[in-house]
Image (cartoon, rainbow, N blue to C red):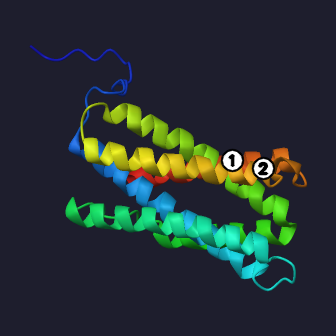
Amino acid sequence: MSEVKTGRAKRPPLPGTGFSRDRLKEMLRVDHAGEYGATRIYAGQRAVFSRLPGARRITAQLAEQEADEKVHKIAFDQLLVERCVRPTLLGPLWGMAGYSLGIFTALMGEKAAHACTAAVEEVIETHYRDQIEELGDREPELKAMITQFRNEEIAHKDQAIAEGAKDAFAHPILETLIKLGCKVAITVSQKL
């Protein structure tokens, strides 16, 4: 008997169901790409602020946040190797884009740099929350690691907001564009 096609698109599995090795690879690939992109944003911002008089405080804050992101990236570097997952093919593009975004927002001023952090971290906070839910009871060590990283990303976001992120020039536009860029990068990096 031949299979009847209904014309409906196959729906993705609900969180906690239909989990596969391919999905795990997508998660690791995109998380690695995101942490790499974050290190590049902070590096771009520090490249500007480290040259400005009176910017020691923000430079130190950015260096501390970047150090957290480097730890996250190293953890995902290790998981990619252990689980035979290739990194995204777009890594060089994300590196250039992140560094450029860091420079651009730093040139706009401290509040814009903080707005960038807040926007990126809000997207990542949601992204990690969704992954934690999707993992369910599977991969308890990975789930714990992502939970820890999510908590650190939330702390970065909260610090950025406390430093005036929402007072940045053209904040709504800047926030919308940065969040959109992050969401596109997440979607593309899972597959490529």
The image shows residue 143, relative to residue 69, as above or below, that is above
Residue 188 or residue 110, whichever sits in front: 110
Tag 2's secondary structure? helix
Q: Position of residue 125 (x, y in %)?
A: 55, 43
Q: Which mark is residue 119?
A: none
Q: Quadrant of the C terminus?
A: bottom left
Cβ atoms under marks 1 and 2 closer than 8 Å: yes
Q: Which residue is mark 2?
A: 162
Amino acid carrying mark 1 in the image:
Asp
Distance between the Cα atoms at labels 1 and 2?
Answer: 6 Å
Q: From the viewer's perspective, is 164 left or right of 177?
A: right
Amino acid carrying mark 2 in the image:
Ala
Residue 178 in sight from this viewpoint: no
The image shows residue 110, relative to residue 163, as above or below, that is below
Tag 1's secondary structure? helix
Q: Which residue is mark 1?
A: 158
Residue 46 in sight from this viewpoint: yes
